[in-house]
Amino acid sequence: MLRRAVFTTVLLSASLSAAAEPSKQACVDAYAKGQEQRKGGALVEARDAFRTCSAEACPGLVRNDCVQWLSEVEVALPSIVVAVRDAQGRDVPDASVFLDDKPVAGWSRGRAIELSPGQHRLRVERGAGSAVEQSVVASVGEKNRLIRITAPEPVTRTSPAALPTSDSRSGPPTWSLIVGGLGLGAIGGGAVVDVTASSRLRSLRDDCAPRCTESEVDSVKRQMLIGDVLIAVGAIAVGVATWGWLGAERQPAGVSASASRGEGVAPRPLRMSARLRRDPGSRTPPSADGASGGERRRAPRRE
């Protein structure tokens, strides 16, 4: 049983190591891709490719070149160390650091961050809606460059209960705007009707006066009456809307709401009626000697 367990363990370890080793085609692809990335300045990606083709499973010629190139890239690869502090100079380990919009893990443990040469963008976030950005230009071969960033102050949200009450006056109520608009529309419509009726009246005077039919004259009079009524109704509506608007401006915001909830209304004290206080049937409490208050008042005076 022991031999079988040892054999199984060795076989499993060999299979896992074989699965971790790259294939020959993967070695050749990493060999070619790493050279292209190195020429393009993407040293981080080139390093990963050269690590792949430096494995023991890769062909000898490929592996020898990749080992040499890997050592050269690791020497040229720049790195930075990010130090995040607040305005008082204290470390802020709970901040989030992003390099080119990608989160950086383990930055707060003081580890160096390797990056390709060129310009990069660092962003530090501290809480929701609080961030600061800084541009960094990494040079070839520059190692462990210290980047100091002052973290922004965290945004504190004020609860609605702590907000100060506003003394600003409330805006015009909605009904006053609606009534005012209808009133202006009625005035405009009545004016149009009056102008049309006046034009028809001038036409009748020019064409058939004084022999115009009664129906034609009544039609013009009715139209003029309708126009006058519309203008009068519109004027009343505008007046009501103006009154509502001015009344809302005189009343501070929030008064009506508090009044509807009963806030600020002191309860009336209960009063005992005079009849109850003067009721002859009511009795006063006895004194310490057993006599009532009335009896004490009728006691004879000493001479």
Image (spheres, rainbow, N blue to C red):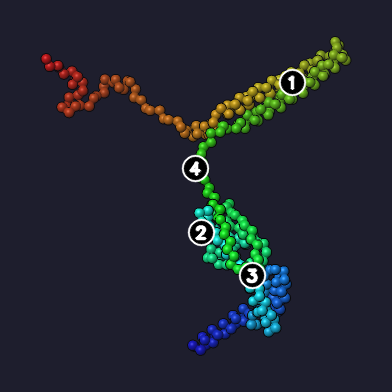
**Which picture quadrant has residue 103?**
bottom right
In the image, what residue occupies the spot 57% across and 85% down? 11
Question: Of 142 and 6, which appears nearest the observer?
Answer: 142
Q: Which residue is mark 2?
A: 91
Badge 2 density bin: few <14, some 14–19, many ≥20, Cα 10 Å: some
Q: Are marks 2 and 3 in contact (CB under 8 Å)?
A: no
Q: Which secondary structure lies at badge 4?
A: helix
Q: Amino acid at mark 3?
A: Gly
Alpha-carbon span between mark 1 and mark 2: 79 Å
The percent position of residue 21, horizontal first and vertical second, equals: 63, 80
Q: Earlier in the sequence, mark 1 or mark 2?
A: 2
Q: Are marks 4 and 3 in contact (CB under 8 Å)?
A: no
Q: Earlier in the sequence, mark 4 or mark 3?
A: 3
Q: Which secondary structure lies at badge 1?
A: helix
Q: Earlier in the sequence, mark 3 or mark 1?
A: 3
Q: Is residue 96 visible?
A: no
Q: Earlier in the sequence, mark 1 or mark 4?
A: 4
Question: Of 76 and 124, which appears nearest the observer?
Answer: 76
The percent position of residue 252, horizontal first and vertical second, equals: 54, 31
Q: Say which mark, if any, is on residue 141.
A: 3
Residue situated furthest left in the rendering: 303
In the image, what residue occupies the spot 53% across and 36% down? 166
Q: Is residue 220 left or right of residue 277?
A: right
Q: Amino acid at mark 4?
A: Ala
Q: Which residue is mark 4?
A: 162
* Quadrant into which the C terminus falls: top left
Q: Which residue is mark 1?
A: 227
Badge 1 density bin: few <14, some 14–19, many ≥20, Cα 10 Å: many
Q: Which secondary structure lies at badge 3?
A: loop
Mark 2 or 3: in front is 3
